[in-house]
Image: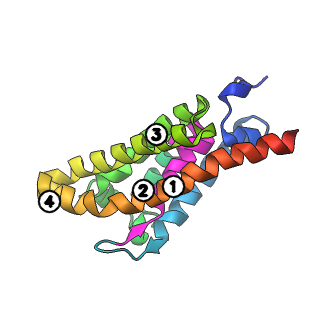
Amino acid sequence: MNSITLSHKTIVDAVIPGEGVARDTMLVVGGTALTAICAQVTIPWQPVPFTLQTLSVMLCGLALGPKRGALSQLLYVGIGAAGIPVFAQGKYGVNVLFGASGGYLLSFAIVAGILGLLAQRGWTKSIWKTAAAMAIADTFVLGFGALWLSAYIGGQAAFNSGVAPFIVPEVMKAVIVILALPLAWTLTKRSSQ
């Protein structure tokens, strides 16, 4: 019997029923692939272009749950560090992971885990709770990333180049998730009736 009760299911558990190592592995690898693909999607934005990488991190956490979500991001960071060009702009290697932007990458598994816990507690079924989850996640990613970056360029410069330009794009990505997940739950409920 599945240890995830109905009230603790994530959207993936509701849409793709089942259990087992093979299923979980498929979901983790799928989350990793989604993040790798989204990291390569660059959207022109002033003053700094942005990718859909953090959008996929948030979706992985909220859709896969804490363990699978965090594992998908650990695998993503691991394969990028090992030399597969999955980071933004096709970058890879330990030097990227421990370079100026490494804090953002290192925050991904933590954020996915936190969001997964919130999803299991039903936070993706309400627009307001999903919005709160996204605010927590974006604050953590941008904050941890900027803190790490500040060791390279100083605090004010880290905020100016590592946080401020990304606030509006992160809000735009959050809106997608805030609208999509509660809608997905509504559609799932309707299809099961």
Whether the magenta-drawn stretch holds residue 1 is answered as: no
Whether residues under marks 3 and 1 lie with C-beta atoms below 8 angstroms apart, the answer is no
- The image shows residue 5 at horizontal and vertical percentages of 72, 24
- Kind of residue at disc 1: Val
Frontmost residue, 77 versus 45: 45
Q: Please report whichever mark, 2 or 3, sits nearer to the chain's N-terminal start.
A: 3
Residue 16 in sight? no
- Kind of residue at disc 3: Ala
Q: Which residue is mark 1?
A: 175
Q: Main secondary structure of the magenta part?
A: helix
Residue 105 in sight? yes
Q: Is residue 171 above or below residue 21?
A: below
Task: Measure the C-alpha gap from mark 2 to mark 1.
Answer: 6 Å
Task: Measure the C-alpha gap from mark 2 to mark 3.
Answer: 12 Å
Q: Label 3: few (<14), some or many (≥20) within 10 Å?
A: some
Task: Look at the image and name its color scheme.
Answer: rainbow
Q: Which residue is mark 3?
A: 132
- Kind of residue at disc 2: Val
| Image quarter of residue 34 | bottom right
- The image shows residue 14 at horizontal and vertical percentages of 75, 39
> Could you say which disc has been placed on residue 157 in the image?
4
Q: Which residue is mark 2?
A: 171
Horizontal side of 9 relative to 71 (left or right) equals: right
Whether residues under marks 3 and 4 lie with C-beta atoms below 8 angstroms apart, the answer is no
Q: Is residue 141 above or below residue 45?
A: above
Q: Label 4: few (<14), some or many (≥20) within 10 Å?
A: some
Magenta segment, which residues? 49-72
Q: Quadrant of the N terminus?
A: top right
Q: Is residue 172 above or below residue 137?
A: below
Residue drawn at 20 percent across, 55 percent down: 159
- The image shows residue 144 at horizontal and vertical percentages of 29, 45
